[in-house]
Amino acid sequence: MELTRLKGFQDLLGPQARTLSHVEERARLLMERYAVGEIRIPLLERIELYQRSTGETSDIVSKQMYTFTDRDEAGTTLALRPEGTPGVVRAYIEAGLDRSDPEQRFFYSGPMFRRERPQKGRYRQFYQFGVEVFGRADPACDAELLVMIDDLRRDLGLEFQFEINSLGCPKCRPAFRAALLDYGRLHFMELCRDCHERLERNPLRLLDCKIDVKLAEAAPKSLDYLCEECRKHFASVVGMLDAAGVRFVVNARIVRGLDYYMRTTFEVTSTNLGAQNAVVAGGRYDGLVEVLGGAPVPGIGFAIGMERLALAMEAARTPRETLPRVALIALGEAAARKATELARELRALPLQVELLSTERSLKAQLKRADKIGANYAVIIGPDELARAAVQLRDLGASSQREVSLAKLAAELGAARQ
RNA sequence: GUGAGUGUAGCUCAGCUGGCAGAGCACCGGAUUGUGGCUCCGGUGGUCGAGGGUUCAAAUCCCUUCACUCACCCCA
């Protein structure tokens, strides 16, 4: 086969697709309870949107975007969205909400694209479910988002580790950054090769080096450099999380790779996911709306890695209840007509009903019923048709009895319990 | 971009120092005229990832290449 799928792209069949949809359905339900409205935005944007917001130096913008030139005269460069936040902020400003009605909460759900080397839990097209809140600078908002994630976790029956940190604001971050830079230069000879690179590009990243763990742990911490307002904000968030019963740890090494984050940042991980174990990440980005040409409105948000969450679900083997499944077996043309009508009736109960191929033998159809995991087989042939009845077979118990057509729905309805 | 591992039937894999390509599962049929699973019998199914080389002979050895997987980087 030569027309195979692209590297890092995946086909999700049956159960896999189902798990992903299930996670999305639960998240959507939660959004309703948190009064968060939906936003649908394009998959394609001008490249400048990401250059300005995500940051030129970030790996995402500098080497992971799928870009191409449009066919217009100007030759506009377009990019498939590598993340959701910039597009949402753009739409928010474009709708004039930053001026007319700044306090807004949105969620989005859909595919993102990054051209990275794929590995477990990381794909070139991946699905994110994200929430963005605008116009709220108060710590209660930060805490509420984390509580929201904890609610989803509980609803899905999973265990997560929450880690939070504060990166400070434009007032206090420069001092921290400078201290980190000094530290890096002082210990330059002891740093790994990647860290030499990090020192140049993004000193904050020194903190999550996995090689020189001791060196990273001894490095200056942003929490020690917070200004008075940032310190109060962070303490407030911590207090609210405690009060709400969210279990978390403060981890001074949680930094985000994107330029726009400030103050509260967080990362939520799940064990047994392999190396790519971050299922949710986010933080506050108070300057971003302004950077993209809007009013100075604060913002905060997070994104859920949907397939990572789905992987965690599969690993936890969280069972889901499903409707009893009925295989409808018809023998002959007249019976098939009756079965078509019957299927509709049973589905309305509701039951999962699969009408099997009416051209195959009874034996073949029963075999098929077993294969698809049906709980019951309803058999209707010429004899049954004449008596206005069906054979109701319990495939688990291997028992079978004749039931009149009039009573079938009631019988199977009782089986739903 | 870097490193490691793996490519043999639809799936999981065996195949030793080179000598007739195999097993289990799955699929189809039969044993059973309209009764699944269990059992028994039979059957379909192969570019041994691809290309080149060594050899009387290559799935096996050598070279090249491609794909997949995991990890690094980075990130959801």
Image (cartoon, rainbow, N blue to C red):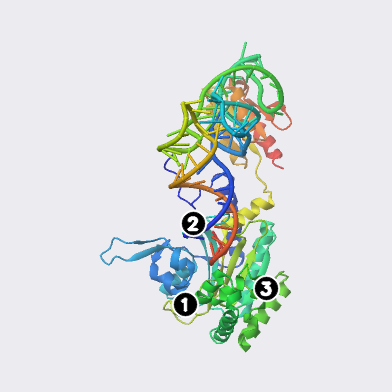
Q: Residue at x 51, y 49 (%)?
A: A10
Label 2 and label 3: CA atoms lie apart by: 33 Å
The numbered disc on residue A214 is 3
> In which quadrant of the rendered view does residue A301 lie?
bottom right
Tell me which label, 1 or 3, sits earlier in the chain. 3
Query: How many numbered badges does the structure rendering display?
Result: 3
Pick the quarter of the image with the C terminus of chain A.
top right
Q: Is residue A143 visible?
A: no
* Kind of residue indicated by mark 3: Lys
Label 2: which secondary element = loop
**Residue hosting label 2:** A124
Mark 1 lies on a secondary structure that is: helix
Can you say whether A174 is above or below B31 in the image? below
Q: Which mark is residue A289?
A: 1
Instruction: Name the quarter where the N terminus of chain A is drawn.
Output: top left
Q: Chain of mark 2?
A: A
Give the number of the mark in front: 2 or 1.
2
Nearest to viewer (mark 1 / mark 3): 3
Residue A80 spot, x, y in % from top left: 42, 61
Disc 2 packing (10 Å; few <14; some 14–19; many ≥20):
many
Chain under disc 1:
A
Left or right of residue B13, residue B7 in this image: left
Image disc number at residue A172: none
Query: Same subunit under labels 2 and 3?
Result: yes
Categorize mark 3 by other alpha carbons within 10 Å: few (<14), some (14-19), many (20+). few
Residue visible at 63% across and 73% down in the picture: A253
Query: Mark 2 or 1 closer to N-term?
Result: 2
Name the side, left or right, on which A143 lies relative to A6: right
